[in-house]
Amino acid sequence: MMRIAKSVTFDAAHYLSLASDERPYSRMHGHSFRLTVELEGEPDPVTGWVEDFGDINDALSDIHEQLDHRLLNEIEGLSVPTLENICMWVADKLKARFAGLARVVVERPSNGEACTYTIRH
């Protein structure tokens, strides 16, 4: 079994209205995010690939377009845009396209924060 990974970055704003007014993240603010997806499987005997990186890039480009320079709270399914919910949202977008989807990681590098969602098969 092999695992491959592809990453993309995006910048977006959000707020967490469930947080106490004393918390700064209850107000609208922005982050630079790093999204990494990992796929696992056996390499195809003909191509030698677990998955075509071009196909992964196309899928991540679609996600990038939906998230980059947006207010995440306004995106369907992300009204509460925590790292955890962003991971699940991305996984839901990719599961049907990539049977070998194994992990989704969303990071906020400037804060030293990350969430990893491991998909059980």
Image (cartoon, rainbow, N blue to C red):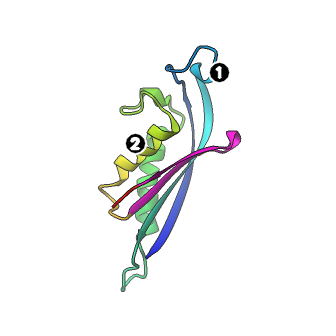
The picture places residue 48, in percent across and down from the top left corner, at 43, 82
Instruction: Determine the residue located farthest toward the top in the rendered image.
Output: 21
Q: Which residues are magenta?
A: 101-118
Q: Of the two numbered discs 1 and 2 on the same chain, state the one appearing first in sequence.
A: 1
Kindly report the secondary structure that dominates the magenta region of the rendered protein.
Answer: strand
Quarter of the figure with the C terminus: bottom left
Q: Residue at x 29, y 55 (%)?
A: 96
Q: Residue at x 36, y 85 (%)?
A: 46
Tag 1: residue type? Answer: Pro
Q: What numbered label is drawn on residue 81? A: none
Quarter of the figure with the N terminus: bottom left
Q: What numbered label is drawn on residue 24? A: 1
In the rendered image, which residue does mark 2 sit on? 89
Q: Is residue 107 left or right of residue 102?
A: right
Tag 2: residue type? Answer: Trp
Total tally of numbered discs in the picture = 2
Q: Is residue 113 left or right of residue 4?
A: right
Quarter of the image for residue 27 reads top right
Q: Secondary structure at mark 2?
A: helix
Q: CA distance from mark 1 to mark 2?
A: 24 Å
Mark 1 touches mark 2? (CB < 8 Å): no
Q: Secondary structure at mark 1?
A: helix
In the image, residue 51 above or below residue 61: below
In the image, residue 42 above or below residue 81: below
The picture places residue 13, in percent across and down from the top left corner, at 56, 29
The picture places residue 42, in percent across and down from the top left corner, at 39, 77
Q: Residues within 10 Å of mark 1 (few under 14, many from 20)?
A: few
In the image, residue 12 above or below residue 47: above
The picture places residue 91, in percent across and down from the top left corner, at 39, 49
